[in-house]
Image (tube, rainbow, N blue to C red):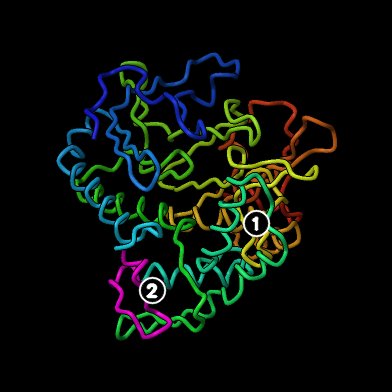
Amino acid sequence: MSSPQPPGNGDTGPDRRQFLTGRTTDDHESVRTPPPRPEPLFSFSANAMGSRFQILCSRDAQRQLAPRVSEGFELLAELEQQMSFYRHDSEISQINRLAFEKPVPVEPRLLGLLQRAIELSTGTFGAFDITTARVNRLWKTARCEGRVPDAGEILEAIEGSGSNRLAIDERHSTIAFAHRRLQIDLGGIGKGYALDRLTELLTRSGAKDFLVHGGQSSVVARGLRGVNLNDSATAGIPWRIGISHPLKLATRLAELNLENQCAGTSGSGRQSFIHGGRRLGHVIDPRTGWPADHWLSVTVLADDATTADVLATALFVMNRDEFHKFIQKNTGIGIIALRYGKTEGDLVAEVANIARERVAWLDSRVNVVAAVSAGKAGTR
């Protein structure tokens, strides 16, 4: 864990997706009255789940949060130990070894997470599925070898997968597998769940205004960011996060205001390769066993980080028809999906359920369109 940063520009620095930003939305607008100046941020950070988790807050919130931070980072370590697919002694690994032979007892909150994963799989047309560990591992190995798996390898890897083959007994808190080749991998949901659990713990400190992220691609914003009250009577301003260009991650395309909301982003900008003229990323469609290529990146806003993380992955996997069907049925989910435009170098951003004033676009070549034709997007 790091010590709190001294007052200064503590909310910027190297990150995986350049997701956080200290810039205000008004920095690129000509205004008569300068916007309120954000207070310097204090930071606590720790490594977990292959990511850098960070807590950002003002001086007042830092005093409240500090006694809980060590406990929070210990919780992250415990959750990693419980959910890791790659640790032989994790609870998930035990489930993967035994659940086809007999029902396996599961810690109640982990059982609830598995139930939620099944629900989200059903609600996303199967575009999200925690049972495709074998095909994910196949593609990871093939990328390292500089090749593409053949059709036979892919069919073998996805054989027997499917969340509908998971049998959960809530009364006895157990899970069983209906196929011997099933394996669970919580890589697409575990980090969001960990952020929700960490936020839950930090909130018990009494602090209401802070931001937590895990590897920059998953963010929880609580309350408002403090401002310098010598300049303004404003109580606070929304937390501002950046949305990066999906292919040039050092370039920021937009800035998004968050207040009491969570964001998750899925894309393949850093983990992809070209094969046969086709760009193949690391996000696999669990229904076909092939990398998804309908979108360049998808950012989702939701009330909890678990849902935001899962839906960012699921929507990235969906084709255009599925994507629009989902949006029409889920008007409470904010979405920004980026795809190629008609002209080389241009991008199209399909936006749903996010008010226009909450997004500041920084690149004029991005063609921003409503993701639904009903005209009801942009209410949140």
| Residue 360 seen in this snapshot | no
Quarter of the figure with the N terminus: top left
Identify the residue at horizontal 40%, vertical 60% (top origin): 85
Q: Quadrant for residue 330, please give it.
A: bottom right
What is the x, y in percent for residue 30? 60, 15
Q: Residue furthest left?
A: 67
Q: Residue furthest front?
A: 145
Decide whether residue 326 is among the magenta residues. no
State yes or no: discs 2 and 1 in contact (Cβ < 8 Å): no
CA gap, disc 2 to disc 1?
28 Å
On the rendered structure, is 294 left or right of 198? Answer: right
Of circles 2 and 1, the one toward us is 2
In front: 213, or 167? Answer: 167
Q: What segment carries the magenta color? A: 90-111
On the rendered structure, is 82 left or right of 298? Answer: left
Identified by mark 2, the residue type is Arg
What is the x, y in percent for residue 238? 43, 35
| Residue 379 seen in this snapshot | yes
Badge number at residue 317: 1
Identified by mark 1, the residue type is Val
Neighbour class for label 1 at 10 Å: few (<14), some, many (≥20)? many
Which residue is disc 2 drawn over?
A: 97
Badge number at residue 357: none
Q: Quadrant for residue 73, please give it.
A: top left
Identify the residue at horizontal 48%, vertical 23% (top origin): 23
Whether 40 is drawn above or below 235: the answer is above
What is the x, y in percent for residue 185? 46, 62
On the rendered structure, is 216 left or right of 211? Answer: right
Neighbour class for label 2 at 10 Å: few (<14), some, many (≥20)? some
